[in-house]
Amino acid sequence: MFEGRIARFDAPGQPFVIDTVDLADVGPGEILVKVTRTNICGSDLHAWHGTFATRGLGGQLPTVLGHEMVGAVAALGDGVTADSNGVPLAEGTRVVFPYFYSCHRCRNCLLGRRGACLNLKMAMLGRADEPPYFVGGYGDYYLLPAGAVVYTVPDVVSDEVASGANCALSQVMYGLERVDQQLGEVVVVQGAGALGLYAVAVAKARGAAKVIAIDGVPERLELATAFGADAVVDITEATTVKDRAKIVRTLTDGHGADVVVEVVGHPAAIDEGLKLLGQFGRYVEIGNINIGKTFEFDPSRFVFGNKTMVGVSLYDPAVLSRALTFLEQHQDHLPLDRLAAAHYPLDHINEAFAAADGKRDVRASIIP
């Protein structure tokens, strides 16, 4: 018997309710994780506001939000002995894992598109009022289903650094892999929140000749520079799309960017981003997850510019292993600890969401 708390999410606009629940047993192939840290991601905020409906993905209410997490093995189900890289698992082993679960059998999985599994399951979609209860990261425990991909966290990587690996970092790594960002290319990142900062760091690690970050919050622009941005554009100073496009053209000798990554989450950013691209530029669209939002753009610029847009939702689970390697290799020269510097106990989750919604924190965390 495992007893623990969850922050039950009943409906948008309502406070989280702390419940104590019991899990009778851990089934064959399952892993019970003692959660040590769960970040407040943008999609959690959207769900909290009701602009990103988990019901639209097959989810039900009440549920438990939270997916960008790290924890330690609390119990192993029968048959589980090692992680997805073959590293032995035991109680206390620190682990991260994709927050979505592929069947590995359907057409898309067999084609290598596991992020588009036809039988995809995900954290935050299960019910919080029936077993196993621990269906999201905002709780003392989280139950990994049988067959889930899981990786051991290197000893030298702290929970603070590892907590963003299974969502923000892996997402932008996968996006830059999808567009095959090359050595010597110019990358523009729209938005310098957590995903944007990771995108800056990953682009530089992939050999970008120049990375330009765009945002309007001074602290985030300063962080973008610390994460490797060669130039930053402050939208409070360059107030129009024309102004910002001119700056990017100047910084790229008139050519425009080779790759633009959108992590703002506003449709208007897309038309602007396409204007920042040069010939044969590739646009990585990650941020816009609110269904029904639209924007206008001139498709002739897209055609005559030989431009490509790639939508990125989730990632191939194997990317998470590479994300851990990235953290291990680059943590000494990146201020990764500043991403989730603000943290709150589970009992103060309502305060934490209010602070995160006010954008006072780059990435606030819940520590049970």
Image (spheres, helix red, strand yellow):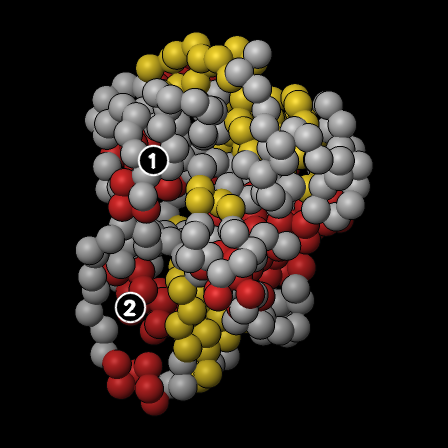
In the rendered image, which quarter is residue 217 located in?
Answer: top left
Q: On the rendered structure, is 183 left or right of 242?
A: right
- Helix, strand or loop status at disc 1: helix
Please tell me how many numbered marks the rendered image carries.
2
Quarter of the figure with the N terminus: top right
- The residue labelled by disc 2 is 271
Q: Amino acid at mark 2?
A: Asp
Q: Residue at x 75, y 39 (%)?
A: 82
Residue 116 vs 68, above or below: the answer is below
Q: Position of residue 124 (x, y in %)?
A: 40, 35
Q: Amino acid at mark 1?
A: Leu
In the rendered image, which quarter is residue 95 located in?
Answer: top right
Q: Position of residue 150 (x, y in %)?
A: 64, 41
Q: On the rendered structure, is 360 left or right of 106?
A: left
- The residue labelled by disc 1 is 45
Characterize the local packing of mark 2: few (<14), some (14-19) or many (20 or more) Cα atoms within 10 angstroms: some
State whether residue 234 appears in this view.
no
Extreme residue toward the bottom, this view: 304
CB-based contact (under 8 Å), mark 2 and mark 1: no
Q: Nearer the viewer, residue 241 or 160?
A: 160
Q: Position of residue 352 (x, y in %)?
A: 40, 22
- Which circle, 2 or 1, is nearer the viewer? 1
Question: Which comes before the other along the chain, label 2 or label 1?
Answer: 1
Characterize the local packing of mark 1: few (<14), some (14-19) or many (20 or more) Cα atoms within 10 angstroms: some
Q: Residue at x 24, y 27 (%)?
A: 11
Q: Residue at x 36, y 28 (%)?
A: 127
Q: Position of residue 122 (x, y in %)?
A: 44, 42
State whether residue 299 appears in this view.
yes
- Helix, strand or loop status at disc 2: helix
Q: Residue at x 33, y 54 (%)?
A: 288
User: Residue 133 got which mark?
Assistant: none
